[in-house]
Amino acid sequence: MKSKILDSYIIRQYLKTFFFTAMLFSLIAVVIDFSDRLGAFLENGVTLKQAVFTYYLHFIAHINGLLWPLFALISVIFFTSRLAKNSEIISVLNAGVPYSRIMLPYMTAAGIIFSIHLLSNHFLIPLGSKIRIPFENKYVWKNTDRSKTRHIHVMLDPQTKLYIMNFRKRDSTAIDMRIETYDENANLIQYMEARRAEWKAPPNQWTISDYMVHKFDGEKEEIQAYKKEPLDTTINITPDDLLIVKNQQQLFTTPELKDYLEKQRARGIGGTRVFETELFRRTSEPISIFILTLIGMSVASRKTRGGLGIHLAIGISIGALFIVLSRFTMTFTNSESMGPMLGVWLPNIVFSFVALYLVRIAQK
């Protein structure tokens, strides 16, 4: 019965402190961001309703998605340090409660935060980013909607290459299109060239006109077809595939992101590292909540002369090191110096050993 009372108290204190910390930092982030972007909002005639519901509602979710592990560390240190200062931790230990048993409510509360964070990272925040990022691109960043318009080279699949000399975004029309097909030995076996190709409808419906098909048998070339009349055909690409948007990887929910990566890999296209990194990040960051909770508890449960101040200093230093290591490995991951899975999970692996060591030497 006493253990249940203790569990309920710790879980309640953890969650209450955590959400208060998240609310406080969210307000600070909104004030800083608003002061930085006020000029752009006024210049582009953004209304208060647009700023609040189209941008800041989703901006707050985005910031919290990035910082919840740090908030968990700060929250645990803050309320656990107060328990240690009042000798409550020592009293519980003296009553014969094992240190591992005290960890249980901490992990339970961390599990609640983890579940919310995991769901948000994979679904809720990306859905909000579909609204927030286009708003930023239109009213803040400007000119981040960068379409490829000249000399486009794209792999439709590992053996088919597409070349477009000019692409008109306004009517989704390609001028001078060429599709080359190769065999398993990388020998050209066929190519189709069309003076004009117009995208008609999803999934991949195009209308080509003034086109010619060349077929090769060894060194022998045959013109298989030549027509000026329009022909409806299927080409495995859409105008959206020629569009590059700032922070595009954040626009996909996890099922959409997996479908996108599968599609790009089937085409034999590289340059997907940032999307793979985003996919792994969405799970690794919620897991870090458990690790940082253990670190915060181990640091703050020891009664020291400096009390809350020294505990917060140690905790914030550890949190800063965690963030620095995360960004450091992320840079190597995106530059292809390190695999995306290893780069994203390395901070968790390193700090797991730190957490285990601190738990081992914690006051028991």
Image: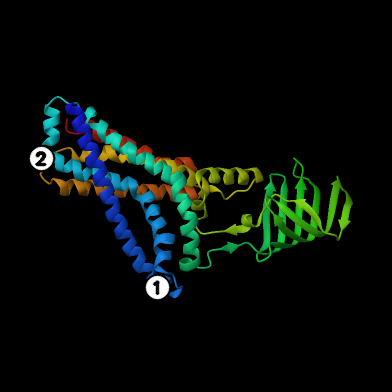
Report x, y in % for residue 11.
25, 37
Q: Is residue 240 left or right of residue 176?
A: left
Residue 7: quadrant of the picture: top left
Against 320, residue 243 (above or below) is below
Report x, y in % for residue 67.
34, 50
**Residue 351 visible somewhere in the drawing:** no
Q: Quadrant of the N terminus?
A: top left
Q: Which residue is mark 1?
A: 39
* Residue at 33% in and 36% down: 111
**Residue 272 visible somewhere in the drawing:** yes
Kindly state the secondary structure of the residue where label 1 is placed.
helix
> How far apart are labels 1 and 2 at the CA level?
49 Å
Q: Earlier in the sequence, mark 1 or mark 2?
A: 1
Q: Quadrant of the C terminus?
A: top left
* Residue at 44% in and 70% down: 46
Q: Is residue 164 left or right of residue 245?
A: right
Q: Is residue 23 left or right of residue 220?
A: left
* Residue at 66% in and 54% down: 238
**Front-most of 284 and 120?**
120
The colour scheme used here is rainbow
* Mark number, residue 196: none
Q: Which residue is mark 2?
A: 86
Report x, y in % for residue 248.
52, 55
Report x, y in % for residue 170.
66, 66
Tell me the amino acid under the disc marked 2. Answer: Asn
Kindly state the secondary structure of the residue where label 2 is placed.
loop
Tell me the amino acid under the disc marked 1. Answer: Gly
